[in-house]
Image: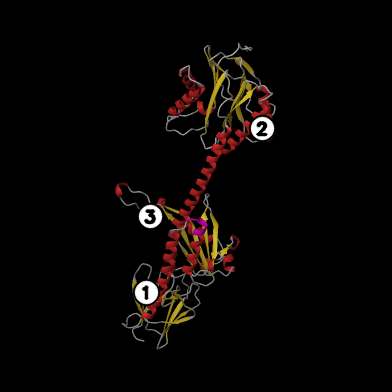
Amino acid sequence: MTGARLEITDQTGQTRVLPLDDDRLTIGRSHGNTLVLDGAQISRRHAEIVNEGDRFVLRDLGSRAGIFVNDETVGDEHTLGHGDQIRIGRHTNLRFRVGDAPVSSVHATSTAVGDLRQTATLLEGLRALGTATVLDQVLAMVIDYAITLSGAERGFIMLVTPSGALEFTVGRGRRQATLPGDTFQTSQKIPKQVFGTGEPLLVADLRDELYAGAHEGTVSLGIRTVYCVPLRLVRYLEAEKNQPVDTGNGDSVRRIGVLYLDDRETGSLSSEQTQHGLETLAGEAAVAIENARLYRESQEKSRLDREMLNAYEFQQALLPTAPPASEYFSASAEMVPCLSIGGDFYEYVDLDGSLGFVLGDVSGKGAAAGLLGARVQEIFAHQAPGNDPQSAVAAINQALVRKQLAARFVTLFYGVLSTTGDLTYCNAGHNAPFLIGATGVQRLVTGGLIVGLFPDAEYEQAVVPLRSGDIVVTFSDGVSEALSAEGEEFGDDRLLACVREAPRDLGPDELVEHVMTTVREFTVGEPPNDDITVLVVRFLGGTTPTATG
């Protein structure tokens, strides 16, 4: 053949021509070759082209990465035709030409058909990923399309955990076979390297001297070729004044994992067309995975929101709607949780005409505090009849201590108002209520320690007389410690002023609403930092009180 030559295009796009004038041309990394090529995937003596008179034969000289003609793996040898594209390594392309004849349509058609098949597979995968919402299905779909696209034997996806570590998530084989996690016995050095650098990595032959000893476990499984590509999520930032945003900024790209493929055939994943397709698929996969995650999180949040709403409604149903009816006193209360479920609670009990009332505050917030509050309500309802406040509080303390709830305690105020106006109370570490009457203001402090922590805690009670119109304002620390936008506390003094400035003829319902409104106005724009509860009892008058101290 006359005019036979190689057109050599390197990774920079530069092309040079090498005439095939000799009978034999060798290709490899060693300087003794006719054509010296650099690259980790190129062996010292990689291949040769031999002129046999009427044909040129391309032979593999035992290379580890193999050689490709028109993107198909070559065995031991291949007879070259005009226009054949030879690839050795990832970025070096050679084209064999003879004379000035046009490129053979057979080779062009074969390559085009392969490219179209891969393109069709890629487009189908991208279209399917655009509509998927279930994370497990998305992950399996990504691997299945990657295997179909590349012809790999196995595929795995590893996603990053909140702690930043890569974690095996799902594995698949050919024919959509799901692989359990214990089959992922390959070296994790490659996935970790790809995740760390954010760059795809092809290892055409794990037995190559460059990787000697680094992946012995993987090689022992018969794996020869590995291709791993990062799953990178691009975060598009809104530009100011309609200017484009540079998404090449490191802050705009987040790596969420890797797509890993391997095969037993040396160099089987080396097709440049395949690698470009996998990188495109990985880019869309990252978006689909993130969308599926967000969808799952939104579904989970909706479920939790429904459960919390049900819990809130149930907790509100446990609180009394009104105190026992009496001509001697009236009462009202309101509890506003800072979360869906509150740790504050209140309760009324009819004690043979006297009014028993309690307001408690469980340490902590949320569901756990709400459950404990409901339990204390139950214990209170059982202990209040037949016991004075001191004894009832002591019994509640013992019941909680026996439960040994670590770091969980309750502050509470329990009072009993008789028809004569005698208020007997016990304050267990709670904010001291205000007793407000015509003669002044008194704080109700007698009692003892918080309940639930100290088995040897002792409690006292006191009796104070109320006159007609006197009110007792009991509240949780969510009221006094409510914060304004400037970080100022509402405080006891502001609460007392709020109550004293209210019209004297306000009933407990109106007074509770007045306090709640004042707190809301004080904290406008700021979310509550604790549950807010107010309970007001007004004595309406009766026989002369029998107790005086």
Residue located 38% across and 68% down the image: 11
Label 2 vs 1, first from the N-terminus? 1
- Which part of the image, by quadrant, shows the N terminus? bottom left
Total labels: the figure holds 3
Label 1 vs 3, first from the N-terminus? 1
Residue located 57% across and 35% down the image: 315
| Whole-percent x, y for residue 313 in the image | 54, 37
Q: Which kind of residue does numbered mark 2 sit on?
A: Leu
What residue is disc 3 on? 248
Q: Is residue 272 visible?
A: no
Give the mark toward the camera: 2 or 3: 2
The answer to which quarter of the image holds residue 122 is bottom left
**Magenta: main secondary structure:** helix
Residue located 40% across and 88% down the image: 54
Q: What is the distance, in whole Å, between disc 1 and disc 3 at their CAs? A: 32 Å
Label 2 vs 3, first from the N-terminus? 3
Q: Which kind of residue does numbered mark 1 sit on?
A: Ile
What residue is disc 2 on? 400
| Whole-percent x, y for residue 503 in the image | 46, 18
The answer to which quarter of the image holds residue 357 is top right
- The part of the chain drawn in magenta is 133-138
Q: What is the distance, in whole Å, between disc 2 and disc 3 at their CAs? A: 59 Å
| Whole-percent x, y for residue 63 in the image | 49, 75
Q: Which mark is residue 8?
A: 1
Does residue 90 sit above or below 19 in this rendering?
Answer: above
Does residue 162 sit above or below 84 in this rendering?
Answer: above
Give the mark toward the camera: 2 or 1: 2
